[in-house]
Amino acid sequence: MKIRILSIVALLLVGIMTSFAQNKTEEFKVYGNCGMCEKTIEKAAKAVDGVKKADWDKETKMIKVTFNTEKTNLTAIHQAIADVGYDTKEIRAKDEVYNKLHSCCKYDRAEE
């Protein structure tokens, strides 16, 4: 009986540790200006399957994302953010999408 209980507890601990091992937290730069940018950037990141948390800081222009590495990767998260008009260090948003941003959200873009 004791061995059976210990086995069950061990399996549960392995399962919990495995699920934590799949989550990764990364930080990267995303250009934007205001609170409206913050909502849009975070919403785009969180819409990627596997993203658990996303928090963008308008002062530092840095986003901190926690995601499941078995479901997504950083490139997919960068792409989702660029798809809504915001440049990251890895992917530049398309000009036509950037041009549709609200006037207060149009940040200074680096030359290509």
Image (cartoon, rainbow, N blue to C red):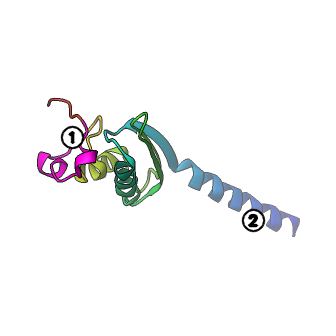
Q: Which residue is mark 1?
A: 92
The foreground one among 82 and 101 is 101
The foreground one among 109 and 52 is 109
Q: Is residue 25 left or right of residue 111?
A: right
Q: Amino acid at mark 2?
A: Ile
Furthest-bottom residue in this view? 1
- The mark nearer the N terminus, 1 or 2, is 2
Instruction: Identify the residue at horizontal 18%, vertical 47% (top origin).
Output: 98
Measured from the top left, where is residue 27 in percent x and y?
A: 44, 38
Q: Which residue is mark 2?
A: 8
Furthest-top residue in this view? 111
Measured from the top left, where is residue 89 in percent x and y?
A: 29, 34
Residue 112, labelled with which disc? none
Badge 1 crowding class, 10 Å Cα cut-off, few under 14, some 14 to 19, many 20 or more, is many
Q: Amino acid at mark 1?
A: Arg
Q: Is residue 36 above or below residue 2?
A: above
Q: Is residue 7 above or below residue 106?
A: below
Residues in magenta? Answer: 91-107
The foreground one among 83 and 107 is 107
Instruction: Identify the residue at horizontal 26%, vertical 41% (top origin).
Output: 87
Helix, strand or loop at mark 1: loop
Badge 2 crowding class, 10 Å Cα cut-off, few under 14, some 14 to 19, many 20 or more, is few
- How many marks on residues? 2
Q: Quadrant of residue 57?
A: top left
Q: Is residue 107 left or right of residue 9?
A: left
Examine the structure image and report whether residue 92 is included in the region drawn in magenta: yes
Instruction: Identify the residue at horizontal 69%, vertical 61% (top origin).
Output: 12
